[in-house]
Amino acid sequence: MNPHLASLPLWVLALAGATIALMGSMGLWRLKTYFERVHAPSIIATMGCWLIMHATWIYFSVRSEEFTPHAFLIAIFIAVTVPITTIFLMRAALFRARRAGKDVPPTLSSLVRNEPQEEHESGSGE
């Protein structure tokens, strides 16, 4: 394949990935609460990463004149770990907010006590 023909999709994919990363960064800056902010990095990490990953494998495949899927390993790792990490961080933040008595949605679990802490439970040793 002619490298000049491959440059247009490379530019489009890399620019789109960088634009999404910029928008996600602006979301971190503009949004007020943690629960609003947590979505912006996941958009950056998934969609921006996948677009840049496609540009990467196209570039290296055209340059070496054979299919080079190495960038897929990074993209798959990010696609698997980002949602799991986001879920765990959100659950921890909700747990802390409930324990602090903030106005957040109630828990659906009957396994973990998620009510606000009272004075005698805060570690006074009684």
Image (cartoon, rainbow, N blue to C red):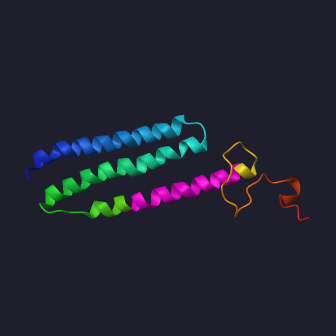
Q: Residue at x 84, y 53 (%)?
A: 118
Asked which quadrant contains residue 66, the reply is bottom left
- List the single residue furthest toward the right: 126
Image quarter of the C terminus: bottom right
- Give x and y (percent) for residue 120: 88, 58
Asked if the magenta segment contains residue 15, the reply would be no
Image quadrant in which you'd find residue 78: bottom left
- Residue at 15% from the left image edge and 57% from the top image edge: 63
In the figure, 59 relative to 31: above or below?
A: below
Residue numbers of the magenta segment: 77-97
Q: Main secondary structure of the magenta part?
A: helix
Does residue 119 sit above or below 103 in this rendering? below
In the rendered structure, the answer to whether residue 65 lies left or right of residue 46 reads left
Q: Among all residues in the image, which is located at the extreme top? A: 30
Residue 115: percent from left, percent from top = 76, 53
Q: How many marks?
A: 0
Q: Position of residue 112 (x, y in %)?
A: 71, 62
Locate residue 22 relative to residue 12 in the image: left or right: right
Whether residue 101 sits left or right of residue 124 in the image: it is left
Q: Residue at x 38, y 41 (%)?
A: 20
Q: Is residue 80 magenta?
A: yes
Q: Residue at x 45, y 61 (%)?
A: 81
Whether residue 47 sits left or right of residue 90 in the image: it is left
**113 relative to 98, above or below:** below
